[in-house]
Image (cartoon, coloured by chain):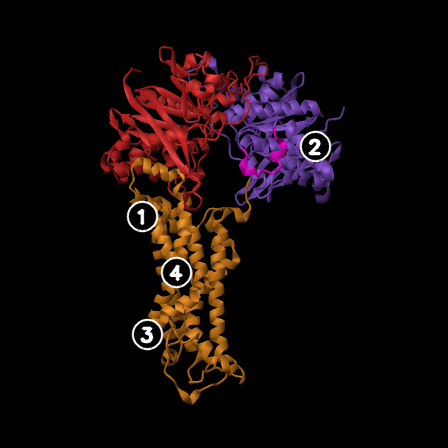
Amino acid sequence: MGQEVLLDIKDLSVEYVSGGGFFGRNRRRVRVLENLNLQVLRGETLGVVGESGCGKTTLANSLLRFIRPREGQVLFEERDVLSMDRASLRQQRRQMQMVFQNPFSSLDPRMDVLGIVGEPLVTHTSLRGKALKEQVTALLVEVGLGPQFVDRHPHELSGGQAQRVALARALALNPKLLVLDEPTSALDVSVQAQIVNLLAELQERHGLTYILISHSLGVVQHVCDRIAVLYLGELVELGPRQGISESPKHPYTQALFSSTPVADPDRSSKRIILEGQVPSPSSPPPGCRFHTRCPYVMDVCRMDRPAAITIEDGHWAACHLL
Amino acid sequence: MEPILQVQDLHVVFPTPRGDVRALSGVSFDIEKGQMYGIVGESGCGKTVTGRAILRLVTPPGKVTGGRVLFHGADLLLKSEDEMRQLRGRRISMVFQDPSAALNPLFTIGQQITGIMKRHGVAQGAALRERAIESLTALGLGEAEQLLCCYPHQLSGGMQQRVMIAMALCVEADLIIADEPTSCLDVTIQFQILDLLVKLQQERTVAIMLITHDLGVVAETCERVAVFYLGRIVERGGVRNLFHHTKHPYTQGLLAALPDPRNWGTTLKMIPGSVPSALELIAGCAFASRCEYVMDICRRVEPPLLPVGDDHLSACHLYAS
Amino acid sequence: MAPVSLGRRMLGGFLGRLRPEPGSGVWYFRRDRVAMLSITVLVLMVLLAVFAPWLTPYPAQGRGTPNIATKLQSPSTAHPFGTDPLGRDVLARVLFGARTALIAGITIQVVSTLFGTVLGAVAGYFGGWVDEVIMRITDVFLAFPPLLLAMTIASVGEPGLGNSILAITMTWWPWYARLVRGQVMSVREREYVKAARGIGVNDLKIIFRHVLPNVMTPILVQSTLDLGAAILTVSALSFVGLGVPPPAPDWGAMVNEGRTYIQNGRWWVPTFPGLALFVTIMAFNLLGDGIQLAANPKARGVGAS
């Protein structure tokens, strides 16, 4: 894994207008993502963690241009995805693909596996008929499914199998980057392990770069090289797996990591229980967005946004405590 | 002391056009008064059906085809529907996975809580409001008075779930069946709720049957556990025994498949294959097709649940001998 | 187009339905006696309509040629349904009336469903001003009671089958547009649609390949249920004189003309056309119900977890 930047996210801000009322009186701007800056290195697995309302799904949607951010750039190999024209975007789609959380809702229930996995090939190449079927079969084998799956429909598949089909589809065009949005959350533990192993294998074989979005810290810690922590639309901490897991510096990260249930009845480490609820994204707290729930809140936290403080090489956190 | 709930050899079947689906095949366990009991397993293992079968709420055309469910010594399966209605929500309460689906969007929180109390004759008049406020406060919901006038959609998921639990508490149920109560919630909220459950359970000696797929949750909150696989209990006992001295290949497989700080970046140990179809009639052990220690006898004879240690039972030919 | 050609998929689908898998929608449908009965009745109706000229010894009378000599005869072996005031064999009239009814009903349904679906899909998928414009147009049409609107439009042109079909179609399509729009809006947010966009499939293909097929079942059910209503509306128009002009056979018109004859004891004049109307519409309704039940797993109550 080198240090070359594959994806450079600059000042990404996404907001949507909610409410409306009559004649648009009650409209509110909801800032889902605020000035996000993040770089993804070629060949790495970057984990993005956070809870509901943190904006991680919006981030994924922005990267693939499913929604239009208010401002910012997403530079893929130095070309801005967000300002590409139609034709370039179409080509760009071959480079970046997404795997969704619910394997069943991401597969068209009326199509068979051949149609589903073949769709990217049909859209971008001239493969048809027998050649197409061969290519699809090869992809299925790569993700651990036999050729007999070609005729199946999504409702005949198990969760793990469906997710593998989704993976096969994502890999069909040989993308460089895969955005995985909670790929194992809807799966059982035993299936999760299978998929996680498969992802590692595929990454090795194809030199893929992954952005793994998840709320399951266990999986993220296992698989990722670096971890980015989002809270209410802002990046609060970023660092290597080891660094963040062993010594998280931001109070939110600390609470997050301590909240993960561990399968050990004798676990003795203290759990940090956060008070209160996550504030609504439509009216974020002033200053540091986390101050309403932070156990170490100080006066300055209520007024000023904390800047990113570098803790070590590649590890920084945005907190006034530092 | 007699356990508050005794499930004995429970069988539930769902007839479908393709054949009978055996949702539960002979499930037995006991829950003591004031105990936190974990029911853990993956999807399709029958854990939700167990909760529903106890309350006689199995979705038709499914039905209970055998066994007994003794609550305070009386068999629930023999009671009339009227008697069950008295029991549900009063002595045995259920907390569901998705609180926003379980709360009626048309009524305020206050109306729903007092409604339940009224229906079960737990309180009258002014006492209704008092008890409602008391329950909500006990669950860490500040400003309970204002909350009574709120509608469910105005509350966050965590708050909604607390309201559900408050509703179970204000009628002073002896047993709460909590079906994945925290799956829909964020991780930081999850433990707020679970801690509350444990605290309340201890303070009020309410027995809680916690149904979940999350082994971590079970390890941290439950006193005793039953592990389900394909409608059967494969291992059962005190939580320490089960996690530290696991004696069933399936449980071992589940624990080994969990990501662990000690083996980051390595291949996770997987359980090969997949869960057999619930339509198949399996002779012998349900887990035989995926077990790495499978022996000939495993395929022929279904292993009975036998003691393998102090307060520890396992249904496995390997460990039973 | 989808990787496997549409033709092969349709053939596969059709052959698959001949021996359906237990538990599938088609399987339920075939076990539903009422639904199968209604399909049988309708197939029979179509056959009778198609072969009408050869099924009766009085094809000319069926089409409208009077024969005063045999007027108002009660049912007999020569005239199983009796004769009408102009001496025409009622059975022949009913058979030829089936043609009118079915042609009208099917044309109205097909055209209005297609038109409504296209507009509704476009409105639902693209949203924004396209949606606004289309919806405001449909609102205008939906503001009027359909029958009244149809009558108004029909009265503009010359009375005739084509005219009434056109009029009714124009009042019919907005319902489908609305229905389809709603369905499309919910399907649009599904992840497989997003996935298709992520692959780079263009919008039009997405609509036809992913959105419409997943949306069509309730539309088809509604369309089938409405076939009966369409036939009834044609008959209603004829009843008030705006539909098919005499002497062409139309069940509604026949009932209208024959109304007064019940009082004189000539009950067969309006009764048989009325029965034909009833049976046909009932059959379509039951068929629609059958499709709905078969397509909707929840209605059947199956599940285990």
What kind of residue is marked 2? Ala
Instruction: Give the number of the mark in front: 1 or 2.
Output: 2
Query: CA gap, disc 2 to disc 4?
Result: 57 Å
Q: Which residue is mark 4?
A: C141
Earlier sequence position, callout 1 versus callout 4: 1
Asked where in the image residue A203 lies, by quadrant, the reply is top left
**Percent of width and height locating residue C164:** 36, 69
Instruction: Give the number of the mark in front: 2 or 4.
Output: 4
Name the residue rendered at 49%, 25% in the picture.
A189
Asked where in the image residue B10 lies, by quadrant, the reply is top right
Same chain check for tags 2 and 3:
no
Few, some or many residues within 10 Å of mark 3 (<14, 14–19, 20+): some
Task: Using the image, determine if residue A253 lies above or below residue C26.
Answer: above
Q: Which of C248 and A270 lies nearest the eye of the viewer?
A: A270
Q: Please identify the residue farthest to the top as the structure is shown.
A: A312
**What label does residue C6 carry, if any?**
1
Same chain check for tags 1 and 2:
no
Q: Which residue is mark 2?
A: B173
Name the residue rendered at 61%, 33% in the picture.
B163
- Position of C160 with respect to A157 (left or right) is left
**Chain A palette colour:** red
Placement of the C terminus of chain B among the 4 image quadrants: top right
Circle 4 — which element? helix
Magenta stretch containing residue B142, yes or no?
yes
**What label does residue C158 carry, if any?**
3
Circle 3 — which element? loop
Mark 1 in CB contact with mark 2 (< 8 angstroms): no
Which chain is drawn using orange? Answer: C
Query: CA gap, disc 1 to disc 3?
Result: 42 Å
**Percent of width and height locating residue A211:** 36, 24
What kind of residue is marked 1? Leu
**Percent of width and height locating residue A52:** 47, 29
